[in-house]
Image (spheres, grey):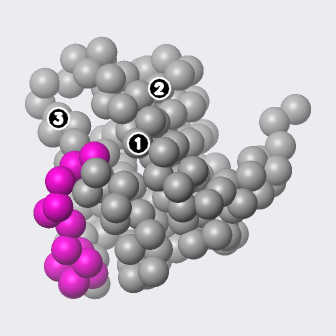
């Protein structure tokens, strides 16, 4: 049987180099999987980046430490247009929360049509993002579980 707590513990123990490698690898897998689903209207890089930032902020705040830990991976994959202060201000105003929710909802709907490899890669990315500070809080666990249910329903 699938043991979610053990999985979270495994991600909590990853070091920064391991996490960056997994994020890079799984991002490539998710992008490829989304491309296979023919979503021409979708800016895949932006949606995926928003999804990652949303996962980091799923506990209700944009934590600078978490953001800075995931930032190198975001830059490596998507370029350098990820300024913390702009992101934090956008998130505080409510616009960021709304945009993150909309992107996450759209991505979850698309992922639900994908194959198991795509779904696994997306959940792995999410776990990397929420565990970037070395722990997976109860809110973060709940977020990942809800996402898993949405894309596997």
Viewer-nearest of labels 3 and 2? 2
Q: Secondary structure at mark 1?
A: helix
**Which residue appears at 17% of the width and 79% of the height?**
86
Residue occupied by mark 2 = 118
Which circle's residue, 3 or 2, is located before the other in the chain?
A: 3
**Which residue appears at 56% of the width and 21% of the height?**
116
Residue occupied by mark 1 = 24
Q: Quadrant of residue 62?
A: bottom left
Tell me if residue 132 comes above or below residue 33 in the rendering: below
Quarter holding the C terminus?
top right
Cα–Cα gap, marks 2 and 1: 14 Å
Q: How busy is the neighbourhood of tag 2: few (under 14 within 10 Å), some, or many (20 plus)? A: many
Cα–Cα gap, marks 1 and 3: 20 Å
- Across and down, in percent, residue 52 comes to 39, 55
Chain part drawn in magenta = 77-90
**Which residue appears at 64% of the width and 69% of the height?**
134
Judged left or right of residue 135, residue 132 is: left
Residue 99 or 81: which is nearer the viewer?
A: 81
Which circle's residue, 2 or 1, is located before the other in the chain?
A: 1
Q: Is residue 103 visible?
A: no
Residue occupied by mark 3 = 42
Judged left or right of residue 43, residue 59 is: right
Q: Secondary structure at mark 3?
A: loop
Q: Quadrant of residue 88?
A: bottom left
Which circle's residue, 1 or 3, is located before the other in the chain?
A: 1
Q: Main secondary structure of the magenta part?
A: helix
Q: Secondary structure at mark 2?
A: helix
């Amino acid at each position: 049987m699938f043991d979610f707590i053990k999985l979270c513990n495994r991600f909590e123990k990853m070091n920064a180099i391991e996490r960056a490698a997994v994020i890079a690898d799984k991002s490539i897998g998710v992008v490829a999987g989304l491309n296979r689903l023919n979503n021409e209207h979708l800016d895949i890089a932006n949606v995926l980046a928003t999804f990652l930032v949303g996962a980091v902020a799923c506990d209700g705040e944009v934590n600078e430490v978490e953001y800075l830990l995931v930032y190198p991976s975001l830059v490596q994959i998507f370029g350098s247009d990820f300024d913390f202060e702009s992101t934090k201000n956008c998130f505080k105003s409510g616009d960021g929360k709304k945009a993150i929710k909309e992107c996450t909802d759209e991505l979850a709907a698309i992922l639900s049509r994908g194959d198991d490899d795509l779904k696994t890669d997306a959940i792995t990315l999410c776990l990397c993002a929420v565990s970037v500070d070395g722990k997976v809080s109860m809110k973060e666990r709940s977020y990942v579980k809800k996402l898993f249910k949405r894309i596997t329903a």
